[in-house]
Image (cartoon, rainbow, N blue to C red):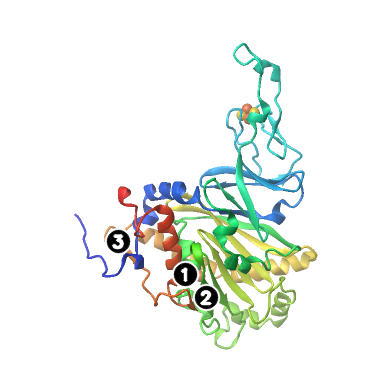
Amino acid sequence: MAVSIPKPALPSEFLVDNRVYTDPSVFELEQERLFLRVWNFVCHASEVREPGDFITTTVAGQPIVVCRTKSGEVRAFFNTCRHRAAQVVREERGHAAAFTCFYHLWTYDLEGTLTGVPEANTYETSYCPGGIDKAATSLVRIRAESMHGLVFVCFDERMPGLAEFLGDAFAAELALPLGAADVRVARDWANELHANWKMEPENSRDGYHATLLHTRLRGVSPPRPFRVYPNGHAVQLLGLDYHAGKNAGTLDGILAEQPDLVARFMADPLPGMTLEEPSRIITIFPDVLIAIRYSTLLIVKQIPVSAGETWFETRYAYLAGDSAEQVDIRRKHWRMYWAEDGGNLPEDWAAWEAQQKGARSIGVRYSLLSRGEVADEGMRGDDNRVRSFWAQWRTYMGTSENAPPAENA
Ligand code: FES
Ligand SMILES: [Fe+2]
């Protein structure tokens, strides 16, 4: 039986067609039109600090390896052997003098050049008298650029560079603490989210839910300014309040009752952080969240797996000179605020998975993005940052509505 309810009487930019969260063909189009074209964050430069350091990851469904070359450059390659397509580097991270594919032991140097082929003379044949052309059989490079320590890759040679993608004013928001020489970033926990990848970027741009879903934030997290930047990026300033009082028993109450722990959380600010602007959420289009709380910092990077499955990866920062105890306290600071088992995240996580289940409904086609007057600056509590995400999504997807592109609807 067909279900039909009227479309809300709003301009289309204030609506999201819920099929964009569940439709496998939209997911495939996003890989092709968005993730294969946009600049995708892959790691912080400190994760590949020394020549030979590498990480592997998946971007737009593509297996890639990012490494520091002998000359100190950060390079990215398709992590696919030129011989018979095996994944060359199979560890998540590590240090290597060269990359040797385990299948037939072809070896590539850190610059990606093929240097070793066992029994290479067997490739010298009547139809290929010169044998293997090693220079032409190197790992295939992908564009990799950095801004303030954040390393991004882009598969599309026609797209402008990273600096243009981020823009000067927004890039300045990233300079501290992330670009400081002594900042180190480490991977923390990761987990499989049973929800579409767009749930998290919407949520991290949505101040409305902050004190409604997260009851612990009521009365301790008053609205602060937000700024929307070109290309779908945004910043939301936040306070940093550990109050007891009516929050006794909540996270903030618990922390307020442990002044020693709060004092340790506040003892070593990250470079550039001040008590006047102690905390902020930085959202980089499409799916990166950087949340800073004075002495600690979290980076979320998602790896979309399918329309309803997303690999959710977190990182945190510390300083090169930190003692083991200082590193631990920075991590604990985050984990009390936003970890898989603590703070706000379990509530956000449950909301995203509930959205994913609800979005399957054929009776409710649209979600609403109509909160607040349109503005590029203001206070938390409206949908402007969420709308800026969707405006950029439409640009990449080549559609005028937040809906499956017409040819796929
Ligand atoms: S597939 Fe890599 S050496 Fe054969
Ligand atoms: Fe939240």
Q: Position of residue 375 (x, y in %)?
A: 44, 75
Q: Position of residue 139 (x, y in %)?
A: 63, 36
Give the residue furthest to the top.
126
The amino acid on which the numbered mark 2 sits, given as a three-letter code, is Phe
- The disc placed on residue 226 is 2
Q: Position of residue 12 (x, y in %)?
A: 32, 65
- The residue labelled by disc 3 is 365
Q: Secondary structure at mark 2?
A: strand
Q: Earlier in the sequence, mark 1 or mark 3?
A: 3
The quadrant holding residue 237 is bottom right
Rate crowding at label 1 as few (under 14), some (14 to 19) or many (20 or more) other CA atoms within 10 Å: many
Q: Is the residue 107 above or below the residue 23 in the image?
A: above
- The residue labelled by disc 1 is 385
Q: Earlier in the sequence, mark 2 or mark 3?
A: 2
Q: Quadrant of ligand 1?
A: top right
Cβ(mark 3) to ligand 2 < 8 Å? Answer: no
